[in-house]
Amino acid sequence: MVQKIGILTSGGDAPGMNNAIRAVVRSGLRHGLEVYGIYDGYKGLVEGNIVKMDRKSVSDIVNRGGTILRTARLREFKDPAVRQKGIEQLNKFGIEALVVIGGDGSYMGAKKLTEMGINCVGLPGTIDNDIASTDYTIGFDTCLNTICDCVDKIRDTTESHCRCSIIEVMGNHCGDLALFSGIAEGAEMILTPDHPIPEDEVINSLRRMREKDESKRAILIVSEKLFPDIKEFADKIARETGFDTRYNVLGHVQRGGAPSASDRVLAARMGAYAVDCLLEDKGGICIGLVNNKLVSYDIYEALSLPRDKHISMLRLIEILNS
Ligand code: F6P
């Protein structure tokens, strides 16, 4: 049976990662394992930035955003020779298995390491909610709440000036943050990769809105990477609709802050479950929450699953705005 496990966080940080680290450490110790923290993701693994953790190492972190183990993106980890260096570092410490908290890129690294003899279990840690093998990723709920706090504030000034506000949110190529925050905020329009409204349609409906009611304001929530130049889009709306228009790119404020209660619980459940899987000698898998039940998937299978495009929620936007 496994006796020494490691844990690392990789890719973009997400609120709730600390809660997952805490659950892995405390659950591992409870099972009599030695638990090692690997700093700076796969980069720290390759460089041997590894420290033994105890109960206290994860005290007082339940309310902290970011990740105490820090994180990094290491493209070179795709190279088997680089991964081999990581394995040599693990061998030095006698670490036999790993929990990897991150997004899809980190999952792939975990699968490849497993194929090289180190059992890895992946936990979905990303604000983007772009991992199909779980209903929710760790960090999504907190990020959504942060976006809503920001949009509530932008709404106050948008209403006071009868303006159109375009708000660009993160999500990489996944529109869930835009879709969910747009519904929560009653946005006039939500533009995501799964729901890209053509520009002329956006302009025509804003123009109609404005013609009907001069005191009307409009909130548009837009996924990042949809428009190469959001300022240009805002200027065009202003020119062609009569709406005084402003744009806001929310940026990295979305990734920070104390994790929500929901993310804390999700991360704690997943972290403890990951340790159970390693104790059963499982590897190359990732954990998900599906219909409120913890599940595990082979990582290749998880990465090939189609993402839920939330078609019913797209319909909901039309109903709510009718
Ligand atoms: O994956 C999380 C995420 O915040 C994406 O939403 C965003 O596209 C990207 O990371 C930004 O990455 P960075 O912090 O490296 O600029």
Image: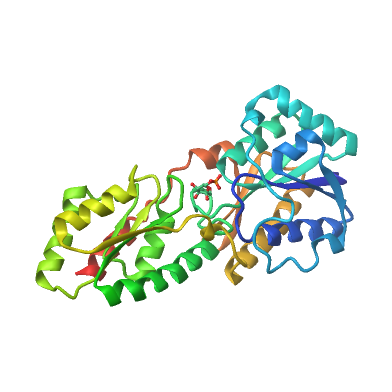
- Quarter of the image containing the N terminus? top right
**Res 244 → quadrant:** bottom left
Res 307 visible: yes
Residue 165, x across and y down, in percent: 31, 63
- Quarter of the image containing the C terminus? bottom left
Res 34 visible: no
Residue 270, x across and y down, in percent: 66, 57
Left or right of residue 248, residue 63 in this image? right
Residue 258 lies, with reference to residue 195, above or below; the image says below
Q: Residue furthest top?
A: 81
Left or right of residue 114, residue 309 in this image? left
Frontmost residue, 263 versus 46: 46
The residue shown at (70%, 59%) is 18
The residue shown at (78%, 41%) is 97
Frontmost residue, 11 versus 216: 216
Residue 268, x across and y down, in percent: 68, 63
**Res 67 → quadrant:** bottom right
Count the marks: how many? 0
Left or right of residue 157, residue 292 in this image? right
Left or right of residue 114, residue 154 in this image? left
The residue shown at (40%, 52%) is 175
Residue 317, x across and y down, in percent: 28, 64
The residue shown at (65%, 60%) is 267
